[in-house]
Image (cartoon, grey):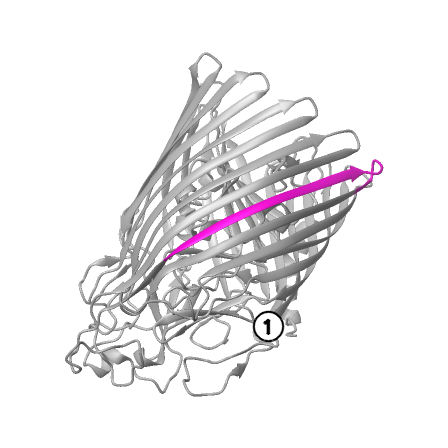
Amino acid sequence: MRSIPKTKLALAIAPILFSTSAYTAAQSVTLEEVVVTARKKEESLQTIPLSVSAVTGKAMRETMVSNMEDAQQGMANVNFAVRLGSAVPTIRGVGFSILNNGTTANVAMHVNGVYIGRPMAVASSFFDVDRLEVVRGPQGTLYGRNATGGAVNIVTNRPTEELSGYIDTSFGNYNSATVEAAISGPLFSDKVLGRIAIRTDRHDGWAKNIFSGNDTDAQDLQAIRATMRFLPSDNLTLDWVVENYHQDDSMYGMKFGGKTNPEAELGGVLLGGDAFPIGSRDINTERDILNKRDIFGTDLTAVWEMDDYTFKSITAFRDTEVNVESDIDATNVVVFSGPNREEEAEQWSQEFQLTYDGDKLSWLAGAFYFNEENDIATVSKEGFLLPSAPAPFYPPDDGVGTVLLFVNGANVETTSYAVFGEATYQFSDAWSATAGLRYTYEDVEINGEYSPLVTVMRDCDALECDLDFSNVSPRGIIQYQPSDEWMFFASVSDGFKSGGFSVGALAPSFDEEEIRSYEIGAKATLMDERVQLSLTAFSYDYEDLQVTKVLDASALTENAANAGIEGLEFEAKMLLTDNFQIDASLGILNAEFEDFESENPTFPGTPPQDLSGNQLPQAPDVTANIAAEYTWTVKGGDLTLRGEAVYSDEYYLTSFNERPDYQDSYTMYNAFVNYNHPSGVRVGAYIRNADDELVKSSGYTTIFALGTPSFTAYLPPRTYGVSFGYSF
């Protein structure tokens, strides 16, 4: 087990301890109470016996948070990235390392209670948000499939009984321009309410394609959501949501970090081409980056309240079409052109919940159904046969030509059924206990898999094509609340993620992974509700975790033996005076493989490497954040200045812990100023990543035949600008 240097720990904790000691007495203002639904019911963030971080929509708008990468700052042991256009969430070292098209994340993503199956579709709902909740630790009992790392809940704003709305605009460097607006109110008397929200977000490229001279990392997206609330009776509510998202730009192209094997030569350089610049946002490719996605979603939520009982139904449909292209040979000649990663997925889901809330006993019981069909393809229409390349680099029919047509893909259908329940009994005013259980049955079927040509098909007599998984995930919690100020808890919970197929590899399937978490924690609301504290310690037993490597031009997923994870999180909000607030967080993490051996494709022909003791990807030992916010009264309004410092220790991007798949420790600074007038007018200015740090958020290494180029995704560069808003 790696030990965390005491100097790093001291530096991370010192600002928090210093800030705590600075408290001064003033009693007229309190911290806002945040209500979350992490256990599928409304609870105060300070009394829920889970490790949860929550951010309100108002706070996100004022700090220019428009995506999950920005939202992670200030959340201990949480890492959000984007790789090849897919959301890559990692919580406490449990993350999404799978590169294959069509796979799912280890962190369950939900929008208004609807599970989102496609990692490429997560960003589509990130506007007109009421709050964002990040739940740490396995959530198998209530959230079921693919929640080994935790769960993320995006809760959007609902229609209001009175006419209200807002418009927020911003303009900044890279010619950025965003507009987000919503209007809400009654449509027909007080029985039908409506809300419509829009967002447009565009900016010029953060970098250039040296070969073509065109921008890359340019963004152009539009989104719209309509919500209607029907109130046919006093105890029945129906919410119908329809949303559409369109994006067509050059975002999410991977950048070149160097060669993982220094002895290898880039294939394109051998053919007379030039490589991408190393450690730069710029690229140098013969084909510009492509990022197209169209996402449509609709859901209907019905809530029927009956004295002590509440029945809820959530019915949802989602259609996702994605086409993302990014060069993977790191040169400006045609070696392995593209490839295009294409997905066309449709998902249906249905969830029923029945809750009871009594004096001593409360419980929730439910059933869940999910079906998704996903047509997946990876296409490289041009390329050269390299002398050192093994199959599947095939020459054309004449046996000597230079053109490569590489395609792989399949149709993957996933069907999941589950029943679940959780009950809490209040033994006394201070003591309560919670027990929960979920049974899941899941079927994953692959049809028509082909690689590297459409005529080379998967043989279902030799390889499995239909997988069945069943799992029982329990949870137990003991909670002790001796006063309104303090709450303590201890819990044990399980989670699982079903197995599947390495689409395009024509390889054996991989198994499910399972995790068990042990947690103890404490939360406090002190100083007349002016200080909120949260502390959680945890330890995981993580078995058969799924990891991916690139082998022979295909991504191959395998099961590691197991991993050990332990750590803690501390979060604090302190209103030191009526005008001065400090927010702080600290994450300590020790996440490493145990008893895991794997062949390293970077060094072909070498025996399997012992990866025991290696750090799990995107799992830094220390993460910390401190923010200071001061508010003045100016001409009847509030002028607020906020500064943030975000620190992360070093981490690796792959399980082999090689450079350049590595990010050194860094500190990032943000600053915001906002003026809010009672009339509803808001004016602001912002700067994010003030030092323009080049931070690798995720990455991977491709095959030896291409020269083992290491590709990485970066967090956004320095952005700054002004914002204007009006609400009524």
Residue pointed to by mark 1: 561
Looking at the image, which residue is at 40% across and 48% down? Answer: 121
- Residue projecting furthest to the front: 461
Looking at the image, which residue is at 44% across and 57% down? Answer: 445
**Location of residue 202 in the rendering, given as x and y in whole percent from the top left corner:** 29, 45
Of residues 372 and 562, the one nearer the viewer is 372
Q: State whether residue 137 appears in this view.
A: no
Residue 447 placement, left or right of 302: left
- Total label count? 1
Q: Secondary structure at mark 1?
A: loop
Looking at the image, which residue is at 53% across and 23% down? Answer: 237
- 10 Å crowding of disc 1: few (<14), some (14-19), many (20+): some
Looking at the image, which residue is at 57% across and 55% down? Answer: 625
Q: Quadrant of residue 253?
A: bottom left
What span is colored magenta in the figure? Answer: 411-432
Q: Is residue 166 magenta?
A: no
Q: State whether residue 107 appears in this view.
A: yes
Of residues 607 and 206, the one nearer the viewer is 607
Of residues 280 and 453, the one nearer the viewer is 453
Q: Quadrant of residue 528?
A: top right
**Location of residue 18 in the rendering, given as x and y in whole percent from the top left corner:** 67, 54
**Location of residue 117 in the rendering, given as x and y in whole percent from the top left corner:** 46, 49
Residue 474 position (above or below residue 125): below
Q: Amino acid at mark 1?
A: Ala
